[in-house]
């Protein structure tokens, strides 16, 4: 049986994972993620799929994060009517994450259309999908259990393995049967893999002796310290004490699922033990609040579920669901903690808290998750002195801090060990879901371990296709049809980032000019440069 793979997302970027498999007339996806980050990358969400959704037989979903599940409502809206196989926890989390994503799109499009009307711009823009579309797609989910084989179509079997990344996350083993009794072609898709030191999740697992491995590489070039929970809490305690000494807000941009819950758990534990000053802890995210209820429902499946449950029911936590409650936090005096989405500061309520507090040296911003290139979170983490938020320039005087221990992703040594443990890998290793430098770092590590020869380590670009023969290296196939976007530039900072940087530079130069005459001269030179371009 000839098995083909087309990489329709997360190719040399960390978002939008979508893998199209085809064998003996069966066509299916593993994941259908939304693109996040620079605007040129997010624009792909509005483009047609590079395949016919009606022609898909089923979808296998590794976990609920939006960069893996976020375009499922669009897929169904475009005509896909088949089953979506996922763990029960993933289904439950998608039932809140996907409608929230649809609601955000509706609000953003409404605001964009208002601006376009004021400017006399183009006709109305429609959302990729609505909250109602997302609610409908949940009806297509079918629950699977870890370690159990399912046969979603004739000739194709799938088995879900614990990935250790988040509640409900899984790696997916695929078997494509071969007529005549020959050994099947075996493929393993990692999904996102968790670190060995995760407090809530068991270590990632997987089968041995597969033909091809498709592995994430988010931290493929990093060797991050990841100690026990006590060490993590000790580092958090130091940051909290310093934030309290400054007397302002401690802002924590956090992903709504798992990161927010872990941070709340640690803060409550530290305050209960008297190791940090007492302060209100606001969870300012309706999505994270709903996700927290799902965590409580599935607590028995977690390593420290009982302790987490106690912390998440603490009276120290203040859940703010309405917009009015969220805005009222700005009236809070003195030291307090605000946990809000999104984790990369690209949307959600964290942005209005950042607008309020970034210019204030009393404030602290704590990053606890990955910050992709081109995102507001990455700019702040890397030391920007001014940023653009919703069209306004905001100066940055707040202190930045980071704790990488909260990340739900394995680092380079852990990824290398996980791939090696899947051996012998008889065919190839595909490195996806990573920025180019991370992919290259992991490729060197895999090659150094002798898992497969260097030519069999693939770094696919968007929409590349491959044949996956049993027991042999993958074969690149000719490009069919139109390739979406600039494969080499996708995921990198784009002209929107350059424009924001230029506007900040102009404002800084005008502010620093000695007098009005110098400012007028600077503006004349800028105008001349534009007119002669």
Image (cartoon, grey):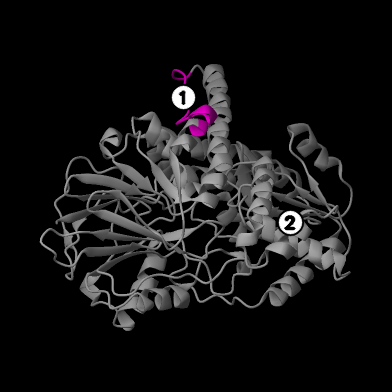
In this rendered view, identify the residue nearer to me: 278 or 92. 92
Q: In the drawing, does residue 517 fall left or right of residue 127?
A: right
* Tag 2 secondary structure: loop
Callout 1: 10 Å neighbours few (<14), some, many (20+)? some
Q: In the drawing, does residue 337 fall left or right of residue 386?
A: right
Q: Residue 70 placed where, x, y %?
A: 47, 42
Residue 156 sits in which quadrant? bottom left
Residue drawn 20% across the image and 54% down it: 4
Callout 2: 10 Å neighbours few (<14), some, many (20+)? many
Residue drawn 63% across the image and 54% down it: 298
Residue 204's tag is none
Q: Residue 336 placed where, x, y %?
A: 83, 53
Residue found at the very far bottom of the displayed protein = 449
Check residue 307 for magenta coloring.
no
Residue 229 sits in which quadrant? bottom right
Magenta segment boundaries in residue numbering: 121-135
In this rendered view, identify the residue nearer to me: 151 or 431. 151
Identify the mark nearer the N-term, 1 or 2: 1
Q: In the drawing, does residue 268 fall left or right of residue 526?
A: right
Residue found at the very far left of the displayed protein = 180
Task: Indicate the quadrant containing the C terminus: top left, top right, bottom left or bottom right.
Answer: top left
Residue 449 sits in which quadrant? bottom left
Of circles 1 and 2, the one toward us is 1
Residue drawn 25% across the image and 45% down it: 27
* Tag 1 secondary structure: loop
For disc 2, the marked residue is: 398
Q: Residue 308 placed where, x, y %?
A: 72, 61
Q: CA distance from mark 1 to mark 2?
A: 37 Å
Check residue 134 for magenta coloring.
yes
Task: Indicate the quadrant containing the N terminus: top left, top right, bottom left or bottom right.
Answer: bottom left
For disc 1, the marked residue is: 126
């Amino acid at each position: 049986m000839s098995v083909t793979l087309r990489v329709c997302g997360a190719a040399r970027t960390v978002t939008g994972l979508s893998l199209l498999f085809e064998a003996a007339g069966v066509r299916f996806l593993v994941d259908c993620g939304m693109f996040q980050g620079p605007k040129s990358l997010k624009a792909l969400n509005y483009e047609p799929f590079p395949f016919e959704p009606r022609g898909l037989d089923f979808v296998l979903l590794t976990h609920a994060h939006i960069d893996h599940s976020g375009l499922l409502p669009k897929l169904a809206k475009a005509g896909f009517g088949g089953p979506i196989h996922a763990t029960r926890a993933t289904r439950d989390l998608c039932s809140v994450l996907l409608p929230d994503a649809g609601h955000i799109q509706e609000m953003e499009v409404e605001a964009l259309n208002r601006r376009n009307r004021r400017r006399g711009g183009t006709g109305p823009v429609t959302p990729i999908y609505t909250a109602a579309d997302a609610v409908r797609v949940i009806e297509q989910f079918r629950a699977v259990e870890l370690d159990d084989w399912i046969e979603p179509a004739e000739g194709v079997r799938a088995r879900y393995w614990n990935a250790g990344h988040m509640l409900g996350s899984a790696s997916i083993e695929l078997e494509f049967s071969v007529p005549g009794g020959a050994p099947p072609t075996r493929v393993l898709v990692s999904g996102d893999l968790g670190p060995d030191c995760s407090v809530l999740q068991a270590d990632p697992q997987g089968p041995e002796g597969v033909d091809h491995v498709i592995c994430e590489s988010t931290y493929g070039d990093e060797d991050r310290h990841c100690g026990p929970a006590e060490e993590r809490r000790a580092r958090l305690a130091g940051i909290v004490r310093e934030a309290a000494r400054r007397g302002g807000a401690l802002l924590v941009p956090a992903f709504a699922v798992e990161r927010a819950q872990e941070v709340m758990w640690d803060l409550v534990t530290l305050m209960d033990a008297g190791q940090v000053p007492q302060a209100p802890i606001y969870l300012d995210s309706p999505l994270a609040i709903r996700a927290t209820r799902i965590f409580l429902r599935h607590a028995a499946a977690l390593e420290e579920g009982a302790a987490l449950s106690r912390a998440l029911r603490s009276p120290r936590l203040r859940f703010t669901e309405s917009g009015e409650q969220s805005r009222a936090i700005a009236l809070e005096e003195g030291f307090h903690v605000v946990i809000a989405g999104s984790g990369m500061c690209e949307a959600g309520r964290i942005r209005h808290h950042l607008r309020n507090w970034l210019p204030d040296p009393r404030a602290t911003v704590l990053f606890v998750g990955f910050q992709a290139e081109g995102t507001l979170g990455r700019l702040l983490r890397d030391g920007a002195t001014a940023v653009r938020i919703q069209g306004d320039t905001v100066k940055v005087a707040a202190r930045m801090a980071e704790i990488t221990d909260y990340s739900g992703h394995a680092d380079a040594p852990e990824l290398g060990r996980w791939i090696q443990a899947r051996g012998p890998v008889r065919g190839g290793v595909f490195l996806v879901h990573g920025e180019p430098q991370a992919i290259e770092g992991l490729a060197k590590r895999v090659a150094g371990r002798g898992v497969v020869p260097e030519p069999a380590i693939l770094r696919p670009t968007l929409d590349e296709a491959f044949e996956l023969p049993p027991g042999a290296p993958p074969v690149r196939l000719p490009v069919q049809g139109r390739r979406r976007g600039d494969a080499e530039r996708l995921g990198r900072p784009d002209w929107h980032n350059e424009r924001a940087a230029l506007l900040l530079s102009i404002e800084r130069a005008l502010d620093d000019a000695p007098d009005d005459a110098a400012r007028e001269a600077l503006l004349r030179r800028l105008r001349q440069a534009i007119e002669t371009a």
